[in-house]
Image (spheres, grey):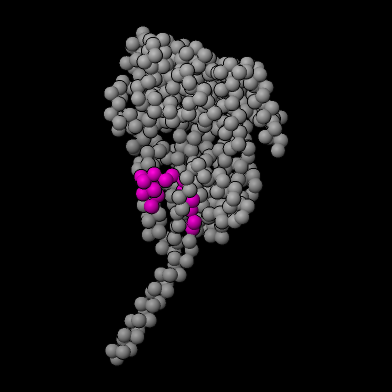
Amino acid sequence: MRLRSLLATSVFVAGLAMGQSAMAQTTVTFWQFFTGDTDVAAWRDAIAKFEAANPDIKVDMELVPWSEQQQRFVTALATGGLPDVSMLGNNVVAQFQATGSLAPLDEYVAAYDAENGTSIVDEIWPGDKGYYILDGKLWASPIAVETRALYYRKDLFKEAGLDPEKPPQTWEELATAAAALSKAGDGKYYGIALPMSITYNTVQNFMSTYLGYGARMIGEDGKCGFDTPEFKAALDIYTRIYKDGGTHPDAPTMDGDALRRGFADGNYAMHIQNASLMKQLQDEGAPFAGDIGIAKIPAGPANRSGFLGGWPLVLWDASENKEAAAKWILFATHGDVLKDMAVASGFIPGSIPLAQGAPWDAFPYPLFVEQLQDARPYQYPSEPIAEMGQLEVDTIQKAVQAVALGQQSVDEATTQLCTTIDEVLAR
């Protein structure tokens, strides 16, 4: 009897092991682009929670730095090896959707909504819908959103004779204030840390100007829509800030990180940046942190348009594990799991209900959360275009830099810009 008992026990243990092995057979490969220790730990925690709730699915996370992701995807599309799930920048979802490389999420979202009593599409920020809903289908589930506001130092406003309780509300007012602050700083500090170089930050700031002036990147005919009085006025006011001495003399060659660092070091009176800058100033013990004011992005004659950054998770069409992969996507981008990651990593969640609650209801977040209602894609009001990832890199900022340095007039730079954009769109 004892032998039979031992044999039965052995069979049971072996069967249990086989069952556990079978449950772990479905592996979801996941490319994650943030490599900092805090971010990685937050994602590992989310994965552990998911695997505990779904013991038949294993998530294999691979770290792919943002700087390498575009080339990794191009290579994987050509030779194979795509993940099941990955992050993407919000403005390149259309690029991969247009080639048929992504799978729509609608059927999985419908099932999730039915099970959880939610309405996921209604939780997506207005601007993100313009990035993720293409041809009537949902192609991405947002993780995070970002917009930028005007940081200003009240102490330096007082020093320059400006009212610290009345920050600039328009781009014209910003240009005037920047020049006055630089004059008061007399070389010790400049009016505003404003990028003019070939860097992402330039187009990410300037898009608020051209949209605010009523310009649009893509015209009704599907070609460049910038050759208009509205765009030229926006280009003129933005570069005038440099020409009038409102920012650093080297701004046309400085990258965005250098300008952010300069503001944190006390070298500027104003800076357009995201919510994380305030935490940075507090963590670093900046002596002027208590004198910081934050205002919405300046408005133009037409409207106030914030930059809309962010990143979602997407499901690659080549995946052979779509159901399991979609389950991971929806688990990671909603509810307490997303909230915990957002708190740990310091970003605003891509879910409106979450972002409107704690801890994003406390300074400095409420202003940023409110502005997200008016944060828009680069090509607003047009539909997303597959070429946006390429256009973002070196087209608009080349025009800004050329005008700032006096290499081209506003008219010349605009003509060249539209020629370049139309060439890219025609390929």
Can you say which quadrant of the picture contains the C terminus?
top right
From the viewer's perspective, is 262 left or right of 222? Answer: left
Image quarter of residue 24: bottom left
Which of the two residues, 125 or 29, is positioned nearer the viewer here? 29
Q: Residue at x 41, y 69 (%)?
A: 20
Q: Residue at x 38, y 30 (%)?
A: 277
- Find residue 7 and report its horizontal and vertical position in percent: 35, 85
Residue reaching furthest to the bottom: 1
From the viewer's perspective, is 216 left or right of 149? Answer: right
State whether residue 73 is above or below residue 217.
below
- Find residue 422 and report its horizontal and vertical position in percent: 69, 31
Question: From which residue to which does the magenta span run?
Answer: 28-44
Which of the two residues, 49 or 233, is positioned nearer the viewer here? 233
Can you say which quadrant of the picture contains the N terminus?
bottom left
Which of the two residues, 56 or 396, is positioned nearer the viewer here? 396
Residue 334 part of the magenta-drawn span: no
Q: Residue at x 63, y 16 (%)?
A: 409
- Find residue 403 and report its horizontal and vertical position in percent: 58, 18
Residue 48 seen in this snapshot = yes
Which of the two residues, 310 or 72, is positioned nearer the viewer here? 72
State whether residue 366 is above or below residue 413.
below
State whether residue 158 is above or below residue 416.
above
From the viewer's perspective, is 134 left or right of 48? Answer: right
Image quarter of residue 396: top right
**Figure label count:** 0
Q: Residue at x 66, y 30 (%)?
A: 421
Residue 38 part of the magenta-drawn span: yes
Residue 336 seen in this snapshot = no
- Find residue 322 and report its horizontal and vertical position in percent: 54, 57
